[in-house]
Amino acid sequence: MKITYYGHACFLLETMDNKILFDPFISPNVLAKEIDVDAIEADYILLSHGHEDHVADAESIARRTGATIVAAFEITTWYGQKGIEALWPMNLGGQKQFSFGLVKFVNAVHSSVLPDGTYGGNPGGFVIENEEGCIYFAGDTALSKDMELIRDRFQLDWAILPIGDNFTMGVDDAIQACNLIGCDRVLGMHYDTFPYIEIDKDAAEMSFKKAKKELVLLEIGAERQLN
Ligand code: NI
Ligand code: MN
């Protein structure tokens, strides 16, 4: 598995010859201005919830690449009304075997509305499991005891967790989440994009280190092999 960071909560996961894009918010993100959104290839676009800072570029990338949008039923319905045909609706607790592996749409504690005010259903996160590994993309979420259910079912290699606080978990809650999910290797997301979620990155890394866990904060545009 290889991951590329495009800023905020957007990652491209390459696994089993597929490209899976999470929560594309690139063109409105001044921190990601070096990223050419029109050069990003994707086979699937996984959306954790409907907020603008997670879906902004999903429509244009889906139209250009033909990638299938995988998201809550209410979100795929909204894209269907825009004329996008490659859609895969899910809802919380459901899992499905895709060409690149198993996807389970797991609980997130947050809210979800689409940019035009349309109800977005429940927000969620994704666990992806295949022969190359197992990762958890939490989406926007609070710390929740439900995360233990993930540890009971999966052996995670990596977790992608929000650490920006204010709208989601912060650093301390993300460290606690590691214990609940049984995974000590974290890629941080959802920090520094807006003044509300600016963090001290050195302090965050130090806090993880003290808790004997690894926090990786990728530069925007950087890639990393996961394993
Ligand atoms: Ni959100
Ligand atoms: Mn968000």
Image: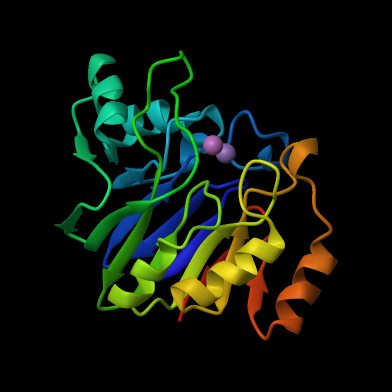
Picture quadrant of residue 146: bottom left
The C terminus - image quarter: bottom left
Left or right of 7? Residue 3 is: left
**Nearer to the camera, 223 or 131:** 131
- Left/right placement of residue 17 relative to residue 49 reads left
Residue 130 screen position, x and y as percent:
25, 72
Q: Is residue 217 visible?
A: no
Q: How many numbered discs sit on the rendered protein?
A: 0
Rendered location of residue 155, percent (x, y): 35, 80
Which of 129 and 117 lies nearest the eye of the viewer? 117
Q: Residue at x 25, y 53 (%)?
A: 93
Can you say whether 211 is above or below 88 in the image?
A: below
The quadrant of the image that shows the N terminus is bottom left
**Which residue is pictured at 29% across the width and 47% down the height?**
43
Q: Quadrant of residue 147?
A: bottom left
- Quadrant containing ligand 2 reads top right
Percent from the top left, x then y, of residue 109?
Answer: 47, 46
Q: Position of residue 87 (x, y in %)?
A: 21, 34
Viewer-proximal residue, 50 or 57? 50
Q: Residue placed at 24% from the left, 32% from the top?
A: 73
Q: Is residue 162 left or right of residue 166?
A: left
Residue 50 drawn above or below residue 199: above
Vertical comparison of 197 with 104: above or below:
above
Question: Which residue is at the far front?
Answer: 145
